[in-house]
Image: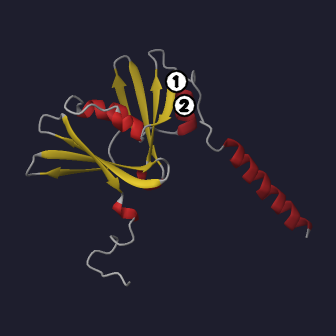
């Protein structure tokens, strides 16, 4: 019985510790790039943005989160933020943004495709809209690599009616 209470005590302590750190960033502004990498691991992609460096960390179930760590020229962390958000999507300028601009703003896509008739390359970004709805943003580039269209909608991977195409659902 004593072992049960001891085990239960350890589990509760771990849960409380997890709750205390939930939502807190594992890194803080001013951290060195090596400190960030030691805490977060190897980034999924690296980008240069002028004289600043960006480290991308794609995470989350179904790839719905991408965090971007931005470093100043001295290699110190300026910001660490989740970039798959409606606000970040809205910051990308139609008719102006290039593929490189999109990569530096919201990171690499989870999937790419091509629409031959209009000649558009499509990058897809699954995300949680308002931290609730399973959504996907499709970013369309023309042959010159300029952003022409952005189209958001529900992520059909989470729609029980679309998981088994051709199979009728019982009512």
Q: Position of residue 91 (x, y in %)?
A: 34, 31
Q: Position of residue 59 (x, y in %)?
A: 47, 47
Q: Residue furthest right?
A: 2
Name the one closer to the observer, 66 or 5: 66
Q: State the SS at label 1.
A: strand
The residue under the point 10% across, 51% down is: 116
Quadrant of the image occupied by residue 105: top left
Name the one closer to the observer, 97 or 86: 86
Q: Which residue is mark 2?
A: 36
- Give whichever of discs 1 and 2 has the lower sequence position: 2
Quadrant containing the N terminus in the rendered view: bottom right
Q: Position of residue 128 (x, y in %)?
A: 45, 50
Q: Which residue is mark 1?
A: 77
Kindly report which numbered mark, 1 or 2, lies closer to the viewer in this rendering. Answer: 1
Q: Classify mark 2: residues with Cα within 10 Å, few (<14), some (14-19) or many (20+).
A: many
Q: Examine the rendered structure and indicate whether residue 140 appears above or below residue 31.
A: below
Q: Are marks 1 and 2 in contact (CB under 8 Å)?
A: yes
Q: State the SS at label 2.
A: helix
Name the one closer to the observer, 24 or 131: 131
The residue under the point 10% across, 46% down is: 119
Quadrant containing the C terminus in the rendered view: bottom left
Display coloring: secondary structure
- Does residue 117 appear left or right of residue 125 in this picture? left
The residue under the point 33% across, 53% down is: 153
The circle drawn on residue 60 is none
The residue under the point 27% across, 31% down is: 93
């Amino acid at each position: 019985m004593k072992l049960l209470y001891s085990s239960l005590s350890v589990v509760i302590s771990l849960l409380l510790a997890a709750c205390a750190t939930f939502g807190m960033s594992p890194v803080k502004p001013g951290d060195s790039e090596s400190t960030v990498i030691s805490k977060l691991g190897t980034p999924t992609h690296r980008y240069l943005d002028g004289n600043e460096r960006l480290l991308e960390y794609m995470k989350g179930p179904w790839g719905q989160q991408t965090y971007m760590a931005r470093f100043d020229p001295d290699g110190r962390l300026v910001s660490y933020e989740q970039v798959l958000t409606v606000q970040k999507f809205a910051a990308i300028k139609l008719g102006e943004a290039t593929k490189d601009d999109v990569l530096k703003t919201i990171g690499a896509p989870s999937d790419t495709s091509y629409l031959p008739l209009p000649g558009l390359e499509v990058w897809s970004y699954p995300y949680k809209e308002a931290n609730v709805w399973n959504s996907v943003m499709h970013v369309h580039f023309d042959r010159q690599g300029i952003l022409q269209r952005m189209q958001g909608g529900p992520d059909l991977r989470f729609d029980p009616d679309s998981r088994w195409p051709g199979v009728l659902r019982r009512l």
